[in-house]
Amino acid sequence: MGDKTKIQVGRLKVGRYVIIDDEPCRIVNISISSPGKHGSAKARIDAVGIFDKRTRSIVKPTSAEIDVPIIDKRTAQIIAMTPDTVQIMDMETYETFDVPIESGVDDAVKDKLTEGINVEYWETLGRIKIMKYKGEGE
């Protein structure tokens, strides 16, 4: 858990994920400046945090390496719900997790969550976020 890997900045694409300020982020824009007389091309990466939804930007040479999170996408069933947390059980390992609704549940699925349904959750850098509603029997 908490795994990450490195990738060359010039190989990043919009929609992929990157780690900025220890936060896994989804890339929303990449602009590359042409190399100057004595320098290398630079990439400006704009990304939004998966957990905190904050926009972050970083500028790096396209030849540099940057950390990207390894995201584990898994299926779980909702066992219990409180006003602040959702308790889920992994369908393979039967591990249970308490996920905070505020930072751990994607806005698109917040209203659909009820006990007994299956969801897709992502685990990265030791944190969990419920991303998709899978419905019954899926």
Image (tube, rainbow, N blue to C red):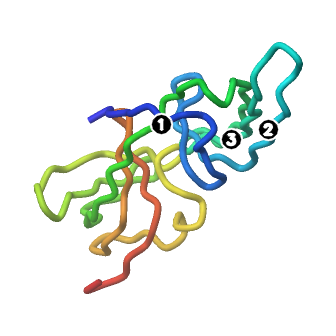
N-terminal of the pair, mark 2 or mark 3, is 2
* CA distance separating discs 2 and 1: 19 Å
Residue at x 27%, y 57% (from the top left corner): 88
Residue 68's label in the rendered image is 1
Residue lying furthest top: 38
How packed mark 1 is, by other alpha carbons closer than 10 Å (few <14, some 14-19, many 20 or more), is: many
The residue positioned 49% from the left and 54% from the top of the image is 105
Q: Nearer the viewer, mark 3 or mark 1?
A: 1
Q: Residues within 10 Å of mark 3 (few under 14, many from 20)?
A: many
Residue at the outermost left position: 93
- Residue 34 location in percent, x, y? 85, 33
Circle 3 sits in a helix, a strand or a loop, which is it? strand
Kind of residue sitting beneath label 1: Val
Pointer 2 residue: 32
On the rendered structure, is 91 left or right of 100? left
Q: Is residue 101 left or right of residue 93?
A: right
Relative vertical location of residue 5 with respect to residue 119 in this rendering, above or below = above
Label 1 near label 2: C-beta < 8 Å?
no
Q: Is residue 53 above or below residue 34?
A: below
